[in-house]
Amino acid sequence: MAIRVGFLGPRATFTHLAVEAYFGNDVEQVPMTTIPQCIDAVADGEIDLAVVPTENALEGSVNLTFDYLIHERPLYIVGEIVSPIEQHFMVHPKRRDEWENTTRIYSHSHAIAQCHKFLHKKFKGITYDYATSTGAAAQYVSKHPDEPVAAIANEMAAKEYGLEIVRANIHDYTYNHTRFAILHPSKKFDYRSQTLLSDKEKTTLMVTLPSDQSGALHQVLSAFTWRKLNLSKIESRPMKTGLGNYFFIIDIDMLVDEILIPGAIAELEALGCGVKLLGSYEAYSIKQSTMQES
């Protein structure tokens, strides 16, 4: 029986692109409407894995993902996919020669924000309509060929929905990437990508500080520093239990070993911190496409 992998749909979103690159045709791909729906489906055993966005280089962390994992449905991160984000301006083929007469642009709010310079120059003052995903925007344009509407989405969406890319790579910054977490109910899930190469090993912890203890965050960081554990990320999120109550998401650039990370966790717990392992996993990167700007 094929592994069932859920992702933020519909088909041809950036999350779907990450799923396709990592798993290929070896799994059953299941589009979902929202990130919480993806997480719920894994927690309830309806699917085997979920792939959800966790961080974008320009927009920052996807707070909904971590908040839902922490407060609602705890799952483990068993892998990570880093994908370049390349936004293209596309229309229905019937409107290829009149794309500059577009009066509405449809896409996810992040995609529109990432293409500000192009939109300000070419379509200043026109209406933006926000979709649940870039794939949903492309799907809408494909179903409304007579409307003067365009979508901002990826190359996969143009192919999936039969749209014409009239301006490629309209994003403001070429180094934009998004991280996607692969989620599963247990710490280990034995699946390695056959198409991508792992380029990093990571461990992610959730840490809560002891209340009313000065210098607690400094002591937390010191527990990693003297062990020479490199932290690639530390970010705070509200505990939702009152003002000033936060937890921290910490990424360590190595897998859980038998000495260093367990020792750091033991030291943090001795300080009165709460520590939870969110995952120890390998990260994979998707290469940039060769599509040229036009």
Image (cartoon, rainbow, N blue to C red):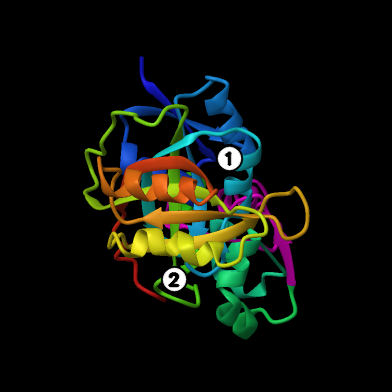
Local SS, label 1: helix
On the picture, is 253 further left or further right than 65? left
The residue segment tinted magenta is 127-156
Q: Nearer the viewer, residue 242 or 237?
A: 242
View extreme (top): residue: 1
**Circle on res. 169:** 2
Kindly state the secondary structure of the residue where label 2 is placed.
Answer: loop
Instruction: Tell me, yes or no, if residue 159 can be seen here.
Output: no
In the image, farthest residue toward the bottom: 121
Q: Quadrant of residue 292?
A: bottom left
Residue 59 relative to residue 26: left or right: right
Q: Is residue 197 above or below residue 193?
A: below
Rendered location of residue 260, percent (x, y)? 28, 49
- Residue sitting at x 45%, y 58%: 178
The residue sitting at 78% across, 53% down in the picture is: 242
For the C terminus, the quadrant is: bottom left
Q: Percent from the top left, x then y, of residue 237?
A: 63, 56
Residue 214 in the image: state x and y as whole percent: 60, 66
Residue at the (51%, 54%) spot, across then down? 249
Residue designated by label 1: 69
Magenta residue check for 110: no
Given the image, on which type of amino acid does mark 1 rest?
A: Leu
Residue 75 in sight: yes
Few, some or many residues within 10 Å of mark 1 (<14, 14–19, 20+): some
Q: Quadrant of residue 35?
A: top right
The CA span between labels 2 and 1 is: 33 Å
Q: Between 232 and 138, which is closer to the camera in this rendering?
A: 232
Q: Are marks 2 and 1 in contact (CB under 8 Å)?
A: no
Let me know if residue 155 is in the magenta part: yes
139 sits to left or right of 76: right
Say which amino acid is labelled 2.
Asn
Q: Nearer the viewer, residue 201 or 236?
A: 236
